[in-house]
Amino acid sequence: MNAQQILQAIENGELDDVLIRLYSADGLDYAKERCRTAVEGFTGRFGDSDRLHLFSSPGRVEIVGNHTDHNHGRVLAGAVNMDILAVACPTDEPVIRVKSVGHKQDDIDLTDLSPQSDESTHSASLIRGIASDFDRKGRKIGGFTAYTISDVPKGSGLSSSAAFEVLIGSILNHFYNDGMISPEEVAITAQFAENVYFGKPSGLMDQMACSVGNIVRIDFKDPSAPNIQPLCLSPEAAGHRLVIVSAGHGHADLTDEYAAIPAEMKAVAGLFGQPVLRGIGYEELMEKAAEIRKQCGDRALLRAMHFVSENERVALAAKAVDDKDFACFLRQLNASGDSSLLCLQNISAASEPASQGITLALAVAKQLLDGKGACRVHGGGFGGTMLAIVPEELLEAFTGRMEQLFEKGCCHCMTFRPGAAKII
């Protein structure tokens, strides 16, 4: 389809069903306006074509399972209706060109897929890394142009980087592989690009949640073949809303803080002759506590304790969701937050002791919720994002207080949605 045909399909309501599935009925008008903006942005940058397509890749929330994936643990996560939207067109030239609003254009020559030192920690490295992994696995690759717009706030804990990686993988999948590569495989490729080309030692949860979508319990006991259990969770049906609160700065400058968590956990595992903590029990940790403290330090032991208990909490939370026991689910979410605060210690950065935005948000949220709903640090931590499940009757007071503390628009009410998708 060309630009005018896509714009006509938007106006005629031909895309309404798929847009409602991705963004909810309440978000339909906003979604249609974003699609129009993306189409106009593409044609303004690259011109028109008869081979234009629309793609969407969602942000994600981690529900329970804070920093468990990188030690082969379990997570409960979900894709949300804030996303990166792209208009893309296949080309005959072996070059991928991506223009993202607010960023310089990336031009990736597919004849050289080796890591480029000057691209490390930049989006260009992710594009090249994904193309490289497709190529080394015998998948087809080819050039395309894409124009992207995003409402996934960078540094929000909604994993804008994973959404971008999955988007690029999805475009290559549909343009050159007939959409036959599974969402799970796209996620694994996205993680490869982030680890090897971008240079960030992330686990697989972010990419898997963005790619697979909806609510999923993911067990990374075997990271090459994660076990995925789809679940159905609707806070709205239980009279609650999912809210993300941005309570601090982004986390682009805190890579060392993040890297220390898996490194310390794996150091503890090493004392048991294991590469990761999965399979080591709480009593085993306690029996070896003195040696762990001496060899690895107190914080490493606390973080190992968090992993062991958090891994079990994911199973309990998933069962509560499956049993439709919303009260039990909320208890597990609150317990996860308490463990992140006390044991994992990823609420604030040790390098910036004066910056306590997320601690403040949690303290005020607990006082306001007064035993109802739930709240916890969201995502990797440190950068200042809180996840809350808020009763409808407290939503106005909750958002008002958070905006009073931080800034207007700091609260984002979301719904869960399917994973990365080709809209048209």
Image: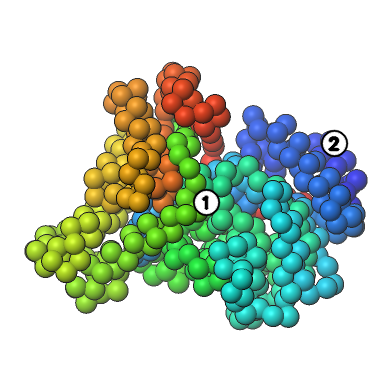
Observer-nearest of 332 and 93: 93
Residue 12 appears in view: yes
Q: Is residue 3 above or below residue 362?
A: below
Q: Is residue 29 left or right of residue 293?
A: right
Residue 189 appears in view: no
Residue 280: quadrant of the picture: bottom left
Q: Dot 2, how many residues are within 10 Å of its Cα: few (below 14), some (14-19), or many (20+)?
A: few
Residue at the spot 44% in from the left edge and 66% down from the top edge: 201
* Disc 2 secondary structure class: helix
> Where does label 2 land, which residue?
12
Q: In this view, does 368 lie above or below 118?
A: above
> Where does label 1 land, which residue?
159
* Disc 1 secondary structure class: loop
Q: Residue 35 placed where, x, y %? A: 76, 42
Q: Is residue 88 left or right of residue 266?
A: right
Label 1 to label 2: alpha-carbon separation: 33 Å
Observer-nearest of 294 and 84: 294
Q: In this view, does 365 lie to the left or right of 79?
A: left
Q: Dot 1, how many residues are within 10 Å of its Cα: few (below 14), some (14-19), or many (20+)?
A: many
Q: Residue 17 placed where, x, y %? A: 71, 40
Q: Tag 1: residue type? A: Ser
Residue 67: quadrant of the picture: bottom left
Q: Nearer the viewer, mark 1 or mark 2?
A: 1
Marks 1,2: beta carbons within 8 A: no
Q: Residue 253 placed where, x, y %? A: 47, 54
Q: Residue 60 placed where, x, y %? A: 51, 48
Q: Tag 2: residue type? A: Asn
Q: Earlier in the sequence, mark 1 or mark 2?
A: 2
Residue at the spot 48% in from the left edge and 37% down from the top edge: 246
